[in-house]
Amino acid sequence: MANVLVVGPHPDDQELGMGGTVIRLAEQGHDVLLLDMTDGEPTPHGTPEIRRAEWSRAAEIMGVRRELLGLPNRMVEHSIQARHKVASVIRRHQAQIVFVPYFEDAHPDHVATTRIVEDARFDAKLSKIDLPGEPIYPRWLFHYYCTHLRHIANPMFCMDISDQMDRKEEAILAYHSQFIAPEKNRRVVEWVRQFNGYMGSRIGTAYAEPFFSREPIGLDGLAGLLV
């Protein structure tokens, strides 16, 4: 089993982009930790207290733990301090696999988050650095799609989430202040199901989530490939 770290700029980004995969990995026995860079506030219908209750409920639905890094929403900046905060989480969790948002995005917080985590991956392996925990270099870093661009995903691989799709949607709907209270955002939940349905059709399943990797992915056989 692997230690997996899934980083999101704001609470709900992980659920939208790869909530089904989070659920599937947890079901398979992997130790999955969600790291929220910010609390996502302010928003029109939310408060820090409301959002904390929502992200706690979403994590419960998915069967995973989550932590808040505490950077300011809408002002996430790539800095040494932010890198070292994330590197400390990587060390403490001894993360072997890290997921981050796709690197092209209209939201500055998403772009900054990915840069921070990519560099924190390097920082986490350094032996002569003032960070808690044992050095580790996560073997894999994958990108999930939570883009604010009108971007058509061009993934390297897709994860079958047919059995997890309903729970993914339930976790998204735990964010009442984001996807139920604001009427204009209710369409997002439907769009996510449609998108995951389309990705599933590309690999012969009902639903799937797409992922990208800048690095080659190694295989030791064909047993895990879907036909």
Image (cartoon, rainbow, N blue to C red):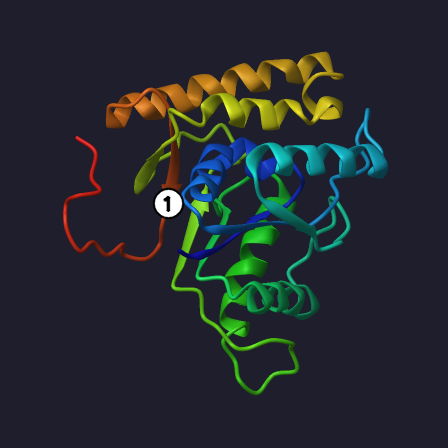
Q: In this view, which residue lies farthest toward the bottom?
A: 128
Q: Is residue 57 left or right of residue 17?
A: right
Residue drawn at (44%, 65%) of the image: 138
Q: Could you say which is closer to the camera, residue 3 or residue 135?
A: 3
Give the residue at x 76% y 24%: 177
Which residue is pictured at 59% across the width and 14% down the height? 187
Pinpoint residue 55: horizontal percent, then vertical percent: 69, 37
Which quarter of the image is occupied by the C terminus?
top left
Amino acid type at mark 1: Phe
- Whether residue 106 is visible, yes or no, is no
Picture residue at 47% right of the left edge, 19% below the top: 193
The vertical placement of 112 against 188, above or below, is below
**Residue under pointer 1:** 212
Disc 1 crowd, CA 10 A, few/some/many (<14, 14-19, 20+): many
* x, y percent for residue 207: 37, 23
**Residue 9 sits in quarter:** top right
Give x and y (percent) for residue 96: 44, 62
